[in-house]
Image: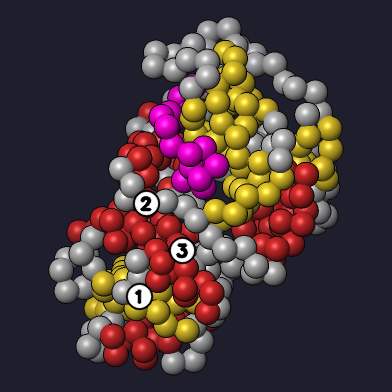
């Protein structure tokens, strides 16, 4: 089978051939339908050796949809059969600590002992024709959802869903929520805010086509990023600022905009991984503003995201490419030429 593999740090991945794996005890073999292409992959490629405790080589792809093809010994689970369409929950924890027991494997208390954050992040992921999942607990059935469209639900939708959900109590009628960066996560964040809250949604991006995508996703206002963006947001909100600012970029400039656009008693939530910093001191952020950096989401929340998608409330905007074109697609992502989410398709 074809697979996209990380074989060396600070180098592009390789498209190579591997044998189809066989599931061992407790494992499930998935025939991959689609694998999302995420900015996090670019960060993985840029990390120097030793930055994370991942062992090379491993197959990329942490946003995966597919069908169950085989169960290893002891892996059969009620409600899950061969041929079922599923999503692979991305963060893989120990499965037994208190966080994992409540489905929050994204915050596994033994994560430091596991030399991988999940499939595609230290362990073999979904950018291949087949993938081994270590336990059926990590699979979420999707019924008749389009598998190619569904793949990004596992991160591009789950991550902003987790971030937005923690602020829903603040988003009462008359409030505003800002989404900075309308890429894979950002265009889903706009849809989730419209589906879950009465807040007016303001989209911010440097690119006109990304703002067009935000408008298609339901944004009420569009603001060009850069100088004057915070002032535009304050004008839209009658000078009060936004009750939630969701920064899907995480650069110095976007975090500065987030702080300047936030209201008193607001949430500034950073999910982008661009490595920026936000000074938190008297005068740097509004009174009683909360700054948080959440990570991914829980297994239960992925099931909730799937329910929203099956109800037609959210739908990832995807462009599909053959798996063999992975390197070209990663370059498109670097250049900002991906609209919504790119999904790699094994077999073309």
The residue where tag 1 is placed is 202
Q: Which residues are magenta?
A: 136-154
The quadrant of the rendering that contains the C terminus is top right
Between disc 2 and disc 3, the foreground one is: 2
Distance from the alpha carbon under mark 3 to that under mark 1: 11 Å
The residue where tag 3 is placed is 186
Whether residues under marks 1 and 2 lie with C-beta atoms below 8 angstroms apart, the answer is: no
Identify which residue is drawn at 35% across, 32% down.
Answer: 102
Whether residues under marks 3 and 1 lie with C-beta atoms below 8 angstroms apart, the answer is: no
Examine the rendering and report whether any part of residue 287 can be seen: no
The quadrant of the rendering that contains the N terminus is top right
Residue 329, given in percent of the width and then of the height, sits at 71, 56
Figure quadrant of residue 160 = bottom left
Secondary structure under tag 1 reads strand
Q: Which mark is residue 290?
A: none
Residue 189, given in percent of the width and then of the height, sits at 40, 60
Examine the rendering and report whether any part of residue 253 can be seen: yes
Q: How many marks?
A: 3
* Residue 187 inside the magenta-drawn segment: no
The residue where tag 2 is placed is 314
């Amino acid at each position: 089978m074809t697979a996209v593999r990380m074989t060396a740090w600070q180098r592009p991945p390789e498209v190579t051939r591997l044998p189809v794996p066989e599931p061992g005890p407790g494992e499930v073999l998935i025939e991959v339908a689609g694998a999302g292409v995420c900015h996090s992959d670019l960060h993985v490629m840029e990390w120097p050796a030793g930055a994370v405790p991942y062992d090379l080589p491993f197959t990329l792809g942490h946003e995966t949809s597919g069908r169950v093809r085989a169960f290893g010994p002891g892996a059969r689970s009620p409600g899950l059969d061969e041929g079922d369409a599923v999503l692979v929950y991305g963060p893989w924890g120990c499965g037994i600590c208190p966080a994992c027991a409540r489905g929050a494997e994204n915050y596994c208390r033994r994560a430091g002992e596991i030399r991988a954050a999940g499939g595609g992040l230290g362990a073999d992921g979904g950018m291949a024709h087949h993938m081994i999942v270590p336990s059926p607990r990590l699979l979420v059935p999707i019924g008749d959802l389009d598998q190619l469209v569904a793949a990004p639900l596992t991160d591009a939708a789950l991550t902003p869903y987790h971030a937005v959900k923690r602020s829903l109590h603040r988003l009462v009628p008359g409030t505003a929520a800002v989404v900075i960066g309308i890429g894979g996560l950002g265009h889903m964040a706009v849809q989730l805010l419209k589906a879950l809250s009465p807040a007016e949604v303001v989209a911010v991006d440097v690119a006109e086509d990304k703002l067009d995508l935000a408008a298609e996703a339901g944004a009420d206002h569009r603001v060009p990023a850069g100088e004057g963006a915070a002032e535009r947001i304050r004008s839209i909100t009658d000078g009060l600022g936004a009750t939630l600012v969701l920064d899907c970029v995480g650069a110095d400039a976007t975090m500065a905009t987030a702080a300047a656009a936030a209201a008193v008693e607001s949430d500034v939530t950073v999910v982008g991984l661009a490595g920026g910093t936000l000074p938190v001191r008297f005068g740097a952020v509004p009174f009683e503003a909360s700054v948080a950096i959440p990570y991914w989401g829980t297994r239960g929340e992925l099931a909730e995201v799937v329910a929203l998608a099956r109800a037609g409330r959210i739908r990832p905007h995807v462009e599909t490419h053959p798996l063999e074109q992975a390197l070209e697609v990663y370059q498109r992502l670097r250049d900002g030429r991906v609209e919504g989410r790119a999904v790699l398709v094994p077999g073309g």
